[in-house]
Amino acid sequence: MPMELLILGSGTSAGVPMIGCDCAVCRSSDPRDARGRASVMVSYPDVTSPDGQRRLLIDTAPELRLQMVRHDIRRIDGVIFTHAHADHILGIDDLRRFNAVMKTHLNIFADGRTMDILGEMFRYIFEPHRNVNQSFVATLRPHVLRAGGAFTLHGARWTPLALLHGRLPILGFRVDWTE
């Protein structure tokens, strides 16, 4: 099986259909016009994986739970964040189900700026010892990336690329994998 890119969501930051929009796409009954916010899954073969497949999630859209259920994704091997806009990170809490199902932590990868924002916004995840109540939170192991600093994940070489999203520096990724 070759490398696969599954687009889980391709809508705008407001999602499609959008609240209060009467355009033809937002009023459409065609399920192809219902597009959640941006998230993708990169999959490639790896004989050392429990099911022979590695799955790396890029970004955690607010609809992450729905995206995973729709595609029957029960296991992921890590999460890579491009940047810390809400439409790319607000599904992070749903990663806890992968911890429960897989019975292990999840590695997450992001640049320093994004990792700092994740730590501030989701302190209950990254500092669980400070939670007043015992709660079920994601167990995430952070890895800080820098643009140009290639790294290997399960046999594929990932190269973070510096991009601009408007004026915001973000990361894009080149993935090199050979059969």
Image (cartoon, grey):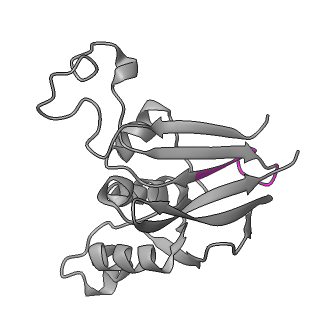
Residue 46 point in image, percent of width and height: 79, 50
Q: Is residue 6 above or below residue 163?
A: above
Q: Is residue 119 above or below residue 160?
A: below
The residue furthest bottom is: 130
Residue 11 point in image, percent of width and height: 37, 37
The main secondary structure of the magenta stretch is: loop
* 126 inside magenta stretch: no
Which of these two is toward me, 96 or 157? 157
Q: Could one spot residue 141 in this view of the protein? A: yes
The residue furthest top is: 29
The residue furthest left is: 20
Residue 28 point in image, percent of width and height: 26, 15
Name which residue lies at 15% across and 35% down.
Answer: 19
> Which residue range is magenta in the image?
47-56
Name which residue lies at 54% across and 65% down.
Answer: 104
The reply, left or right, for residue 22 in relation to residue 135 is left
Q: Quadrant of the C terminus?
A: top right
Q: Quadrant of the N terminus?
A: top right
Name which residue lies at 57% across and 45% down.
Answer: 41
Q: Could one spot residue 78 in this view of the protein? A: no
Which image quadrant is residue 139 in? bottom left
Q: Is residue 73 above or below residue 78?
A: above
The reply, left or right, for residue 148 in relation to residue 87 is right
* 55 inside magenta stretch: yes
Which of these two is toward me, 31 or 124? 31
Name which residue lies at 25% across and 29% down.
Answer: 17
The residue furthest front is: 167
The reply, left or right, for residue 156 in relation to residue 173 is right
Which of these two is toward me, 39 or 165? 165
Number of numbered discs present? 0
Which image quadrant is residue 100 in? bottom left
Residue 53 point in image, percent of width and height: 71, 45
